[in-house]
Image: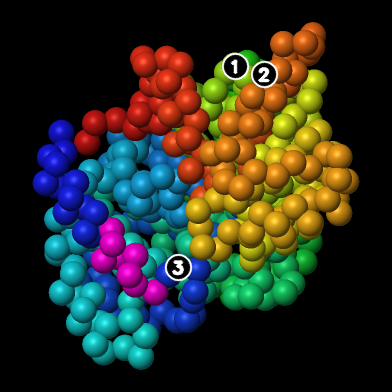
Amino acid sequence: MTSPEDREVLKVVEQALLKRWPETKLEPSLDRIAALVDALGSPQLSYPTIHLAGTNGKTSTSRMIDSLFRELDYRTGRFTSPHLESFLERISINGLPIPPEGMIATYNDIALYLDLIDSRQPHPISFFEAMTALAFVAFAEFPVDVGIIEAGMGGEWDSTNVVQSSVSVITPIGLDHTEYLGETLVEIATTKSGIIKPESHVVLAAQDVEVAKVLLAKALEKAAIVHREGVEFGVGKREIAVGGQQITLHGIHGIYPDIFLPLYGAHQASNAALALAAVEAFVGVKLDDELVQRAFANVRSPGRMEILYRDPTVIVDAAHNPHGAKALAATLASEFDFESIFGVLAILGDKDVLGYLREVEPIIDRLVVTQNSSDRALPVEKLEELAVQVFGRDRVFVESDLKSAITYAMEQCTLVNQVSDGISAVVILGSVVTAGESKAIVRKIALSHNPDYVDPDDLDGEDL
């Protein structure tokens, strides 16, 4: 049990980290993180790693890899970003967020080194660089048997790219963060291919043809062993099931039937194939069928097509770009049978908002536009203007804040369900920030109706 004193110290630690250069503003370079980990004794080299880059699906795939390794009795360290509700989520040990006392101790270990590198570099250590170093040190101290490291943005100059991964995983690549990564898929792929290490294994999701050419060329340059979705591995069979889907996976070393995956969407089946191939590449042999079945049955991916409430049905999804919105729309259309959908949208201003709206318009009947608490949030007035262009005036409603928008949508959905034979639902979307804040809002609503409500996230992972 975390003491009140530790909770107060944790707040001080978080504020100290947040005062650093934000992760949304970059000065692309490995100089600072390289100097920092060198001063720390290169903790990231004390355990083998799997490194993930891509536009969408990294966190879900990371969680699946983590679950597979834990079933294999590996002690795991998983670094992902951004977080939904607590920055502790970014550093996971054996499936659980690092405890507050662990974060405090790790921060105290590196705080002086952060100041030292700040004094020697033209730009100080950023928030993301500091979090990356904290993860590296925490995993070394535990210690872990394998690190599962998700790149934050890009690849070549991402601060996670000081690892020497034995397996690199590249999830589907789409247009996002174009101000840093480039205006074309080829430019973005070139940057992300920078995680591929010499003579390593490279596991590639299905990609646009031009993207695939870039990734394969980099793999050839590095003399890496390539495993491609749809060629060396993939999804053999997929059927919709209650609470998720039933799939057969064709791995690198064998076929794995009868896998229940408690996540929705064809994209999650592909993520599962990617995760399995990554672990197979790491261990070099076929895994036990029952072990694989257990690992995937235990997978959770909070904020990704996650059902938060049942009456009315409330789903949250962190899709934040058109590529992710397309997968969200396809999943809602093919795997749910809602009579109508109330969308609640809060999105960041640096995204392709019109592209996003066009992807979700076919599956959302009424859209409530609002904004989250991020200082990057698109103002609700501007979002309303764009939404009307795509949805029309009659289908767009405005609420000034996320809580009131969710409350309004749930109330309206309940009224529709009371007078209709079909079932309508609320889908909250637009941003990881929106997803995290929505989970907290809906949790309070659930507790007000049922004091015994247990958040499924509390059941994730295992004891350290």
Q: Is residue 33 left or right of residue 276?
A: left
Give the mark nearer the N terminus: 3 vs 2: 3
Do the residues bearing badges 1 and 2 touch, measured as CB atoms within 8 Å? yes
Residue 124 or 451: which is nearer the viewer?
A: 451
Residue bearing mark 1: 311
**In the displayed structure, does residue 236 sit left or right of residue 60?**
right
Q: Which residue is mark 2?
A: 414
Query: Badge 3 is on which residue?
Result: 23
Report the quarter where the C terminus lies: top left
Residue 18 falls inside the magenta stretch: yes
Query: From which residue to which does the magenta span run?
Result: 14-21
Q: Is residue 196 visible?
A: no
Earlier residue among tags 1 and 2: 1
Q: Residues within 10 Å of mark 1 (few under 14, many from 20)?
A: some
Q: Amino acid at mark 1?
A: Asp
Q: Evaluate whether residue 357 shows in this view.
A: yes
* Residue 246 on image: x %, y %: 63, 22
- What secondary structure prevails in the magenta region? helix
Q: Is residue 373 above or below residue 43?
A: above
Look at the numbered discs 1 and 3 and tell me whether their residues touch, using CB distance below 8 Å: no
Question: Which marked residue is nearer to the observer: mark 1 or mark 3?
Answer: 1
| Residue at the image position 41 percent from the left and 21 percent from the top | 447
